[in-house]
Image (cartoon, rainbow, N blue to C red):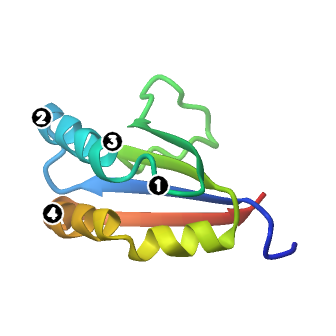
Amino acid sequence: MSSSSKIAHMVYFTLENNSPEQVQHLLSEMRRCLDKHPGLEYFGCGTLTPDLSRPVNDKDFDVSLHTVFADRAAHDAYQVDPRHLEFIENNKSNWKTVRVFDSNI
């Protein structure tokens, strides 16, 4: 795919403290820091849907982030944007694991 392809950037967080309060805190931080970036065409965040439990469902996360960028340049600018870096710095202490899936779409 060309460098002008859209980039889907999906991130799955497993939290050290996954209390309802901490889950809601992370979702609030995502909405505050990660939405409305230049070139961001789609933003969504949410939680595991526990009753979807087919054998293929990966249930090893608490919170998910779903973003689609217009192109690679928008994605790359987001990665170093001060709001994105602030989100990481302010929240990483409660991250047990973070899995990132980037795709050309």
Q: Which residue has dot 3 on it? A: 31
Element under label 4? helix
Which amino acid, mark 4?
A: Asn
Q: Determine the residue located farthest toward the right in the rendered image.
A: 1
Look at the image and tell me in which quarter the N terminus lies: bottom right
Q: Which residue has dot 1 on it? A: 37
Are dots 4 and 1 in contact, CB under 8 Å?
Answer: no
Tell me if 26 is positioned left or right of 73 in this view. left
Element under label 1? loop
Upstream in the sequence, badge 2 or badge 3? 2
Label 1 vs label 3: CA separation? 11 Å
Say few, some or many: other residues with alpha carbon within 10 Å of mark 3 (under 14 / 14 to 19 / 20 or more).
Answer: some
Q: Position of residue 44 (x, y in %)?
A: 48, 39
* Residue shown at the point (74%, 59%) measured from the top left: 6
Are dots 1 and 3 in contact, CB under 8 Å?
Answer: no
Towards the viewer: 83 or 95: 83
Are dots 2 and 3 in contact, CB under 8 Å?
Answer: no
* Residue shown at the point (59%, 67%) measured from the top left: 74
Q: Which mark is residue 90?
A: 4
Which amino acid, mark 1?
A: His
Q: Which residue has dot 2 on it? A: 21
Q: Nearer the viewer, mark 2 or mark 3?
A: 3
Label 3 vs label 4: CA separation? 14 Å
Element under label 3? helix
